[in-house]
Image: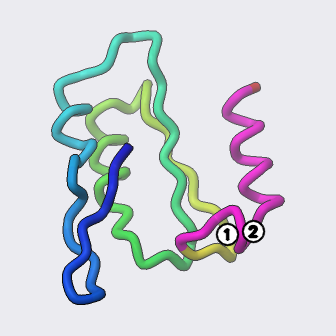
Amino acid sequence: LVTALWLEGNPLWAARPLNPRLKQGLAPHIHVTVLYGSQTWVDASAGMELLSLLPDQIFVTIIPSAGHHLYADNPHALQEAVVSRLA
């Protein structure tokens, strides 16, 4: 899991960033889906960078009308995105 560090109420960098580890490559059978809300405060550039490095294994999906809490902001679109990736 990637966890965020907080200092005086402000988010800092992830405690264990995923990108440096994924840049080393993935086994060919492993695929990763990265989900962002269209209105999130999270910088989507990390997911886009991974997509450019591993285009056959990384999938980036933007959930419309959702912020950081995809499950609460647009549960139907989140469900649709997850189910479509599992199918």
Asked whether 16 falls inside the magenta stretch, the response is no
Looking at the image, residue 65 sits to the left or right of residue 49; the answer is right
x, y percentage for residue 55? 39, 32
Label 1: few (<14), some (14–19) or many (≥20) C-alpha neighbours in 10 Å? some
x, y percentage for residue 47? 36, 51
Looking at the image, residue 52 sits to the left or right of residue 41; the answer is left
Q: Which residue is mark 1?
A: 64
Q: Quadrant of the N terminus?
A: top left
Position of residue 62 relative to residue 32, above or below, is below
Q: How many circles with numbers are drawn on the protein? A: 2
Mark 2 and mark 1 in contact (Cβ < 8 Å)? Answer: yes
* Mark found first going from the N terminus, 1 or 2: 1
x, y percentage for residue 40? 49, 75
Which residues are drawn in magenta? Answer: 68-86
Identify the residue at image location x=24%, y=22%: 25
At mark 2, the secondary structure is loop
* Secondary structure, magenta segment, majority class: helix
Q: Amino acid at mark 2?
A: Asn
Q: List the single residue furthest toward the front.
A: 8
Asked whether 77 falls inside the magenta stretch, the response is yes
x, y percentage for residue 45? 31, 60
Identify the residue at image location x=25%, y=75%: 6
Identify the residue at image location x=77%, y=59%: 77
Mark 1 → mark 2, Cα distance in angstroms: 7 Å
The image's mark for residue 74 is 2
Q: Quadrant of the C terminus?
A: top right
Q: Which one is in front, 68 or 39?
A: 68
Identify the residue at image location x=20%, y=33%: 21
